[in-house]
Image (cartoon, rainbow, N blue to C red):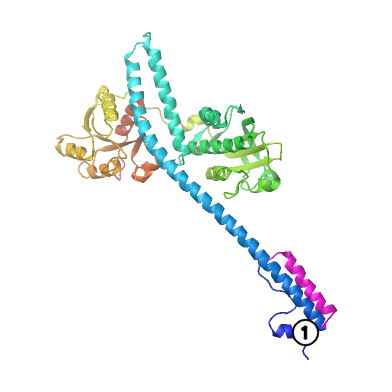
């Protein structure tokens, strides 16, 4: 008579081990070991029956583990779907923000330009001069607010520049106070002098916003939020204990709240895009900030204790240079000219104020309300057209497409695009691809005349 062990082997059910799905936990291994021990100790039918019972128990646990794994997979799928819906909502909001920014910047172009033109005409001692100056200041504040809305709607295209992180904190200070509310005290502790970093300003503003929003949410009944900058040197011991960091001089930005804090398990998952400790929210704040910081060669550290608040530290590599070395060359002092400019702008008020500004500086301006008029004026004008000044987004044809069409007829004509939309729209309509000069609205007399003179005075590339 075959032994129970041999019989089970022949039936394909036993070879001294219990084989289960890889998703089962360590309990299955214990049951398998128990089954094997029973064969060795008892033998015969009793051992066979005991082994069968142990095997049934192990398979039941395996099925239970499979169900648990399936439930976890379904939970992750639901969370991923929620994040996808949220991302789609953000995309919709971003598109809406782009449209609003376009209209807002066009209105601001008119307000700021006529305000500055009035200031030029008013003498220093005239009573109305201070009032007009206040109008211009309010317009400039509104323009900065519109720019920040564009950045935070994630419709922004990165452009690295060397800057002082303290300046970035100052520029977003007013917006941060509105975001955190009256029950949270905002304290700034800037280091001076602070090392320079090479980052995208818009991305850093978004990082700061995300960290501040997270800190605010951790203080539902109010508290204190401290923003600190410092020059630090990261050594090998520090880098070994902190993933993704590099040795050397860094600028540190620390955002500290007095909120509810986090335990170690929660801290370990704070940079996971599908994890959130919030009952409500996007679950993308820290993960997004971490991604943006990594793009600049930096990293993020998290320290927190339950009931004692949280500190998020951003580390950015210092640039071995002074800020002055990276500033743009000073603009031309003589902003007048006599060249011919074809101005293409479908917004009547913006077109009118741009025409007024340019003519006051001596330029000959040919106006066009749309692409059709621009093509007609180009065909009918007998002389040279030195510059095409065009809106990027227009009905029928974009500004860059118009430039390419006119270049076939006027190859020596230079091009300057204007845009009240987001930087993203400039990319989609080919401004960056064609390497065209672009002036971001709102337009002011200073910004327009400086950019026009800059483009006209820049030598053409040999490939053009």
Image quadrant for the N terminus? bottom right
Q: Quadrant of residue 12?
A: bottom right
Residue 441, can we see it? no
Name of the residue lying farthest toward the bottom: 1
- Which residue occupies 78% across, 86% down? 3
Quadrant housing residue 364: top left
Q: Determine which residue is flagged by label 1.
A: 4
69 versus 310 height, above or below: below
Total numbered badges shown on the rendered structure: 1
Q: Residues within 10 Å of mark 1 (few under 14, many from 20)?
A: some
- Vertical side of 435 occupied by 223: above or below: above
Name the dominant secondary structure of the magenta segment: helix
Above or below for 324 versus 270:
above
Q: Pick the quarter of the image with the C terminus.
A: top left
Observer-nearest residue: 246 or 113?
A: 113
Name the secondary structure under disc 1. Answer: helix
Residue 299 in percent (x, y) is at: 59, 43
Q: Nearer the viewer, residue 223 or 105?
A: 223
The part of the chain drawn in magenta is 24-43
| Residue 78 placement (x, y as % from top left) | 55, 54
| 351 to the left or right of 71 | left
Rendered location of residue 89, percent (x, y): 46, 45
Task: Give the side of residue 277 with respect to residue 110, left or right.
Answer: right
**Observer-nearest of 163 and 104:** 104
Residue 25 located within the stretch drawn in magenta: yes
Work out which residue is located at the far right of the displayed protein and give it.
41
Left or right: where 313 falls relative to 296? right
Q: Is residue 291 magenta?
A: no
Q: Quadrant of residue 248?
A: top right
Residue in the picture at 16% in, 35% down? 381
Question: What residue lies at 31% left-to-right and 40% top-to-bottom?
Answer: 393
* Residue 323 locus on image (x, y percent): 51, 31
């Amino acid at each position: 008579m075959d032994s129970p062990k041999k019989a089970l082997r022949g039936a394909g059910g036993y070879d001294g081990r219990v084989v289960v799905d890889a998703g089962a936990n360590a309990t299955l291994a214990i049951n398998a070991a128990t089954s094997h021990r029973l064969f060795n100790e008892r033998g015969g039918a009793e051992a066979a029956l005991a082994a069968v019972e142990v095997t049934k128990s192990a398979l039941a646990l395996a099925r239970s583990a499979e169900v648990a794994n399936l439930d976890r997979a379904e939970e992750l799928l639901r969370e991923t779907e929620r994040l996808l819906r949220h991302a789609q909502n953000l995309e919709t909001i971003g598109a809406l923000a782009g449209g609003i920014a376009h209209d807002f910047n066009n209105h601001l172009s008119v307000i700021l330009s006529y305000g500055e033109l009035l200031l030029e005409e008013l003498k220093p001692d005239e009573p109305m001069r201070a009032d007009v100056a206040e109008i211009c200041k309010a317009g400039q504040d509104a323009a900065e607010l519109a720019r920040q809305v564009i950045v935070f709607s994630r419709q922004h295209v990165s452009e690295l520049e060397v800057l002082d992180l303290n300046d970035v904190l100052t520029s977003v200070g007013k917006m941060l106070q509105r975001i955190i509310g009256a029950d949270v005290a905002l304290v700034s502790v800037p280091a001076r002098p602070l090392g320079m970093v090479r980052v995208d300003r818009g991305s850093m503003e978004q990082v700061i916003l995300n960290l501040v929003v997270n800190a605010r949410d951790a203080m539902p009944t109010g508290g204190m939020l401290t923003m600190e900058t410092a020059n630090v040197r990261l050594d090998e011991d520090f880098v070994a204990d902190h993933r993704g960091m590099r040795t050397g001089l860094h600028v540190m930005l620390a955002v500290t709240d007095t909120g509810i804090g986090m335990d170690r398990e929660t801290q370990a998952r704070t940079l996971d895009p599908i994890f959130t400790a919030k009952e409500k929210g996007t679950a993308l704040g820290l993960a997004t900030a971490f991604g943006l910081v990594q793009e600049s060669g930096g990293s993020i550290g998290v320290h927190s204790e339950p009931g004692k608040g949280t500190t998020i530290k951003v580390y950015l590599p210092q640039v071995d240079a002074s800020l002055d070395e990276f500033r743009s060359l000073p603009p031309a002092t003589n902003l007048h000219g006599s060249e011919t400019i074809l101005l293409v702008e479908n917004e009547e008020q913006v077109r009118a104020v741009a025409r007024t500004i340019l003519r006051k500086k001596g330029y000959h301006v040919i106006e066009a309300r749309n692409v059709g008029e621009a093509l007609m004026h180009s065909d009918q004008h007998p002389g040279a057209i030195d510059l095409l000044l065009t809106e990027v987004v227009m009905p029928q044809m974009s500004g860059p497409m118009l430039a390419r069409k006119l270049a076939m007829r006027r190859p020596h004509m230079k091009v300057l695009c204007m845009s009240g939309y987001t930087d993203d729209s400039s990319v989609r309509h080919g401004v960056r691809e064609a390497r065209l000069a672009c002036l971001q609205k709102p337009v002011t007399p200073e910004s327009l005349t400086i950019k026009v003179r800059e483009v006209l005075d820049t030598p053409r590339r040999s490939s053009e």
